[in-house]
Structures are given as C-alpha cells and as structure tokens.
Amino acid sequence: MKKQILTFILLLFASNLFAQYNQIIKIAKSYEQQGEYYKAIVTYNATNVAPDKPENNNINERINYCGDQLNQLKTKAETQTKLAEEKTKEAEEQTKEAEEQTRIAEQEKEKAQKALAKAEEMQEKMETAIFDKAVKEQ
C-alpha cells in the first residue's frame, strides 16, 4: 500500500512538473508573439534546464530566433537613431541659414530705411529751395 501511495505521489509530482514545463513554454511563446524577445529568451532558458524537458524540443531554435529578432530590432533602432541625428543636424543647419538670411534682410531693411530718410530729407530741402526761390521772385 505504501508503494502504491508513493508511486501515486511520484506520478502526481511528475505530471505537475510536466504541466509546469508546458505552462512555461506557453508563457515564453506568448512573450515571443508580443515581441518581448528578451523575456522570451529568459523564459525559454528556464525551460531548457528543466529535468522533465522532452528530448525532442525546439527550445534552442526558439532562443536563436528571439536573439535574431533582438538583433534586428537593435539594428533598426540604430538606423532610425542615425537618421534622426542626420535630420536634426540638417534642421540645425537650416535654422542657421534662416537666421543668417534674417540678419541680412534686417541689414537691408535698415539700409533702405536710412536711404528713405535721406531721400525725404532731400525732398524737403528741394521743396524749401523751390519755395524760397518762388518767394524771392515775387
């Protein structure tokens, strides 16, 4: 009787371990499907050392796949970062150019205002001279 109870307990324990293995695989696959590749790798590694791991499994393939996906994400992020840096530099250069054009335009405006003031002054002098000549002639 003790042997039967012990066998039953061992079978129950073994089935529980196998259920845990399957549950962990499910969690790892869920992480993988969600794009949480690092978490998937960690979870797959946990199943890789389980004593009840089936002989025929694809855990190492899944780990390699997740590692490849992480590398692709890293490469994509690096490319996007480089592109963003280039766009930022281009925008900064355009800003500098626009500031320079604004400075030049302000200088030209100032020159034009001075020329207008001088022209108005000359026109006033000319009108005064014409008026004075007209008064003298009368």
Image (tube, grey):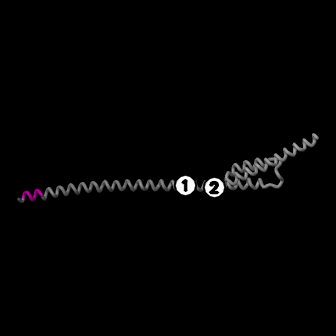
Q: Are marks 1 and 2 in contact (CB under 8 Å)?
A: no
Residue at 85%, 46% in the rendered image: 14
Q: Is residue 35 left or right of residue 9?
A: left
Q: Quadrant of the C terminus?
A: bottom left
Most prominent secondary structure in the magenta stretch? helix
**Residue 126 screen position, x and y as percent:** 16, 58
**Residue 75 screen position, x and y as percent:** 63, 55
Q: Is residue 135 magenta?
A: yes
Label 1, residues with CA under 10 Å away: few <14, some 14-19, many ≥20: few
**Residue 69 screen position, x and y as percent:** 68, 55
Amino acid at dot 2 = Thr
Mark before the other along the chain sequence, 1 or 2:
2
Q: Is residue 78 magenta?
A: no
Q: CA distance from mark 1 to mark 2?
A: 14 Å
Residue at 83%, 52% in the rendered image: 54
Q: Nearer the viewer, residue 1 or 133?
A: 1
**Residue 1 screen position, x and y as percent:** 94, 41
Where residue 30 is drawn, which disc sits there?
none
Residues shaded magenta: 131-136
Q: Nearer the viewer, residue 34 or 39?
A: 34
Q: Which residue is mark 1?
A: 84
Residue projecting furthest to the top: 2
Residue at 93%, 42% in the rendered image: 3
Q: Is residue 96 left or right of residue 105?
A: right
Secondary structure beneath disc 2? helix
Q: Which residue is mark 2?
A: 75
Amino acid at dot 1 = Ala
Label 2, residues with CA under 10 Å away: few <14, some 14-19, many ≥20: few
